[in-house]
Image: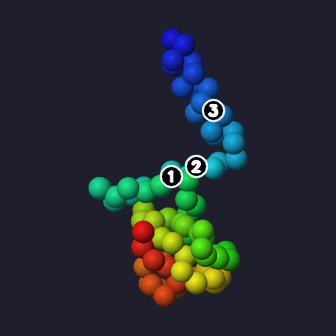
């Protein structure tokens, strides 16, 4: 019972920590780091420590840029490197 209470407290604490962990659907067999945010159009991205998730796949920003529709990570390898 104590273990269950501790686990629930931990999960509640993570949820209240400001949504630092994002759950994403990943293709079967893909390992996705849960703390990376989803790619967002209109958002400014800057390397070197910038990673996102798009379509269940992790990407690392290669060049500083603002994301626009049509420039999704799999479409522009000059901006994003699949991790």
- Quarter of the image that includes the C terminus: bottom left
Frontmost residue, 80 versus 38: 80
Q: Which residue is mark 1?
A: 34
Residue 32 drawn above or below residue 3:
below
Answer whether labels 2 and 1 touch (C-beta < 8 Å): yes
Q: Furthest residue to the top?
A: 1
Q: Which residue is mark 3?
A: 12
Rounded to the nearest angstrom, the CA distance separating label 2 from label 3 is 12 Å
Q: Quadrant of residue 55?
A: bottom left
Q: Position of residue 41 (x, y in %)?
A: 61, 76
Q: Position of residue 52 (x, y in %)?
A: 54, 66
Number of callouts: 3
* Local SS, label 3: helix
Q: Residue at x 57, y 22 (%)?
A: 6
Residue 35 drawn above or below residue 44:
above
Residue 15 drawn above or below residue 43:
above
Q: Position of residue 67 (x, y in %)?
A: 61, 80
Q: Residue at x 52, y 84 (%)?
A: 79
Q: Residue at x 42, y 62 (%)?
A: 56
Q: Is residue 15 left or right of residue 71?
A: right
Answer whether labels 1 and 3 touch (C-beta < 8 Å): no
* Local SS, label 1: loop
Q: Residue at x 43, y 57 (%)?
A: 32
Q: Is residue 27 left or right of residue 62?
A: left
Sequence-earlier tag: 1 or 3: 3
Rounded to the nearest angstrom, the CA distance separating label 2 from label 1 is 6 Å
Checking the image for residue 21, the label placed there is: 2
* Local SS, label 2: loop
Neighbor class of circle 1 (other Cα within 10 Å; few <14, some 14-19, many 20+) is some
């Amino acid at each position: 019972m104590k273990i269950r209470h501790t686990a629930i407290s931990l999960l509640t604490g993570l949820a209240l920590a400001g949504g630092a962990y994002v759950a994403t659907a990943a293709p079967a067999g893909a390992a996705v780091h849960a703390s990376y945010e989803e790619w967002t159009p209109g958002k400014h991205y800057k390397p070197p420590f910038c990673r996102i998730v798009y379509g269940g796949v992790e990407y690392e920003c290669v060049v500083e840029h603002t994301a626009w529709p049509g420039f999704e990570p799999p479409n522009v390898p000059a901006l994003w490197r699949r991790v």
